[in-house]
Image: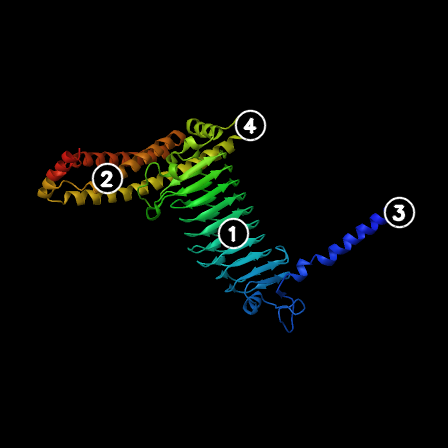
Amino acid sequence: MNKHKIEFNTFFLAIFFCFFLFVPNTRGASYDYYVDSGYSGESDGSKDKPFDKISDAIKNGSKKAKIFIKKGKYAENIVIDREVSLFGESKGKVFLSGGTLEVKKNSSLSNVTIEGGSTAIHIDSGADMEINNCIIKKFGKIGIDALPGDGKVAVRNSSIYGGSGKGLYIEQGREIRISESRIYGNKEEGVDIRAKTKGFIKNNDIYDNGESGIEIIIGSSEVVISGNSINNNGASGIASQFYEGTQKIGEIAIKNNNISKNKKYGLDCSFPSGGSPKPSYWGDSLSLSGNNIKDNGMRSINNFCKIIDAVDEREEKVSNATDENNNLKSKEEVVLSNEKVQDDKIRIEEAIWENTENIDRYQGESEIRIGNRMEKINSVSRWKVFFVGNNQEDLHFIKKEIEINKEQLNRLRDDLRQIENEEAKNGIFVVVDRVEKNIKNGESFVAEKENKKGIFGWFRKIFSS
């Protein structure tokens, strides 16, 4: 045999031997405790004498212990009250059920399936939680519920689906890292994020959820939403919201996402509980770049967002085509059957009518708020008005309400251009009349009261000029 070949083979075998000698078997040697649901007998958590319950391993384990869970079904209530890392043998072989996984301390969970429970995973305020390569499914209320606090929540390469409520509910103050996951088929929002949240949502598939794919309260949030596919959700792709209690602007970067075929908008902007956001609120809080937003039920971006200029040229063309042509289909889609076209019209009209009902409800609340301020202004004595003038803060509040009402009036008029059903049109006209009346009454009242600054008010104006 060739001498050089013998030397090469000897060298290769030596390297091969050293690799297996010195590289540890991570599956067998890197864990502190073991769990096997099929084991019976004396247990100490070792590989040969594993615990048969996960909760026993946590209870008896040391701080920051690494716990390996062998394949099997584990029907138990699990409370993580110390820092541990749980590693399943395989997410297709390790099944947790029977209740909520309560996370009270910094922990991690990998390679398991969690099924059922009202809430699958409940994370306490101060706890950090990492979830990697897991399946969370068929839960009753929430897949992952993170209470308000400053803890971190990381979800990577996981599937969250089939729940009767929200996929993820991230409450105020959290730091989030949601990536490379599939969040779908939940009856409410895929991801629901409250105010003052930081972090990112990137490279996920979020689809077929009953409400919006992502719902986020803007106030003081700093979140990057990038590289996601957000499709076929029952409301909007991304629903950004204003709440009076968290009215500071946020920094929400929405970039390089595919957002399509959602029932309402690709991007919606709303204030579900009322309030008076500045007209520039969403424009100041949201930045858009590189997104592909198309074929959504009403239009790509709700005009109320006032950030259409931030959309790239292709997205703007889609929005304009939607506004002007009532969702006319591209050449390829013209071949769709009349039945499909009719279904699309019905879906659009349902979404428009839902929007109309929300505006009508808001108008009722606005009438009360404006009425209360008018009553407060009118209750001031004539002598006080003569000397001091009317309360400018109350008048300013009424003017802000009028501004919001005008925005809503524009939305209704845009919707009228898209709808064909005469009965539905008549319903929208009723709400339009209501909004116009509220605007007219408010402007008339402000015009009458605004110049009554009182003697002291005029003195201040003269000497300050």
Residue at the (55%, 66%) spot, across then down: 58
Sequence-wise first label, 3 or 4: 3
| Res. 118 visible in picture | no
Labels 3, 1: front one: 3
Judged left or right of residue 236, residue 180 is: right
Q: Please state the horizontal and vertical placement of residue 174, each as a whole percent of the image.
A: 44, 52
Q: Amino acid at mark 1?
A: Ala
* Closer to the eye: label 1 or 4: 1
Amino acid on which disc 3 is placed: Lys
| Mark 2 and mark 1 residues within 8 Å of each other at the beta carbon | no
192 up-or-down from 118: above or below:
above
Could you tell whether 312 is left or right of 427 in the image? right
Splitting the image into 4 quarters, where does residue 425 fall? Answer: top left
Residue on which disc 4 sits: 332
- Circle 3 residue: 3
Alpha carbons under labels 3 and 2: distance apart: 95 Å
